[in-house]
Image: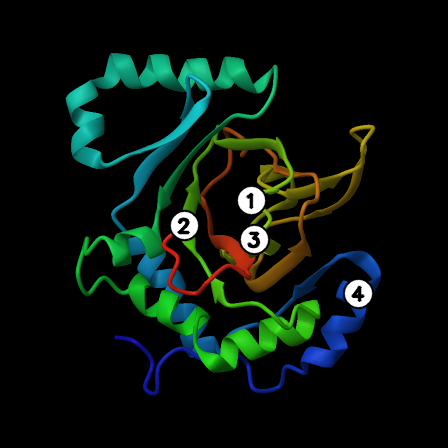
Amino acid sequence: MIPAGGLALNPALVAADHAEIYARDGMVQIGDFLTPESAEWLASTLERATPWRLALSHQGRGQMLKAEAARTLGAAELQRRVAAASADAAKGFAFVYQAYPIISALLDGEDPGHPTHVLAEFFNSPTFLAFARAVTAEPNLTKIDAQATCFQPGNFLTLHDDTGDGERRAAYTLGLTREWRGDWGGQLLFHDASGDVLRGFKPRFNAWTVFRTPQLHSVSQVANYAAKPRLTVTGWLRDDPPHDPR
């Protein structure tokens, strides 16, 4: 059950404390981000009640396959596509992971009443938008989009900068992974133009990481021996018209 009163930020958070770090570094990670009840409910939803789709790069484009579409393709074709995406990763941008497109599913009327749709409403509430504007010093933010992600062993997201069409003022991840070990991979890594890693964050529970875009970053491949998936909600803080479905 959703917490009484709905999802909520940790009331002890002070946006100005984190805004100073964001202004200096172009990124900040905020721990204990949601109330404990909110974080537990959301993590349980991703762990047990989310209809994951296979997200992967294919022939230069991204695609997201529902379970029935994946079954129709068959195991051999899926393995071929995953192998092709892995080969593409050696040359440039590519990805393989599981995802659930919260915003587009909500707008398209899919999975009516799914618990994650509550999160879309929370992220776009006046309270949350005000907090995001204060941390990032982006007063013109109009909306926040979201997708849930699940990185299983072997999954990855290679180097990219989230440029978009100019509407993405910042990107974020909300970590919902419990008790992750540092050598399991899945780190959010930030890179300089030479390819060196400037900073990295391991998956953490109830931690919101927000960073200025464009900025080179990746998610390192999850180790084959990782004991659990990497669960997050990710998206962009945007300043395009709030009712634009892009």
**Mark 1 neighbour class, 10 Å CA radius: few under 14, some 14 to 19, many 20 or more:** few
- Residue at point 59%, 77% (across, down): 131
Alpha carbon separation for disc pair 1 and 3: 6 Å
Comes first in the chain, label 2 or label 3: 3
- Residue 142 visible in rendering: yes
Q: Are marks 1 and 3 in contact (CB under 8 Å)?
A: yes
Comes first in the chain, label 1 or label 4: 4
Q: Please, what secondary structure does the residue beneath circle 1 have?
A: loop
Task: From the image, tell me which residue sits under label 3.
Answer: 167
Task: From the image, tell me which residue sits under label 2.
Answer: 246
Task: From the image, tell me which residue sits under label 4.
Answer: 23
Residue 165, labelled with which disc? Answer: 1
- Residue at point 73%, 72% (across, down): 18
Q: Please, what secondary structure does the residue beneath circle 4 have?
A: helix
Viewer-closest of 196 and 121 = 121
Q: Are marks 2 and 1 in contact (CB under 8 Å)?
A: yes
Q: Position of residue 177 (x, y in %)?
A: 49, 54
Alpha carbon separation for disc pair 1 and 4: 23 Å
Residue type pointed to by label 4: Ala
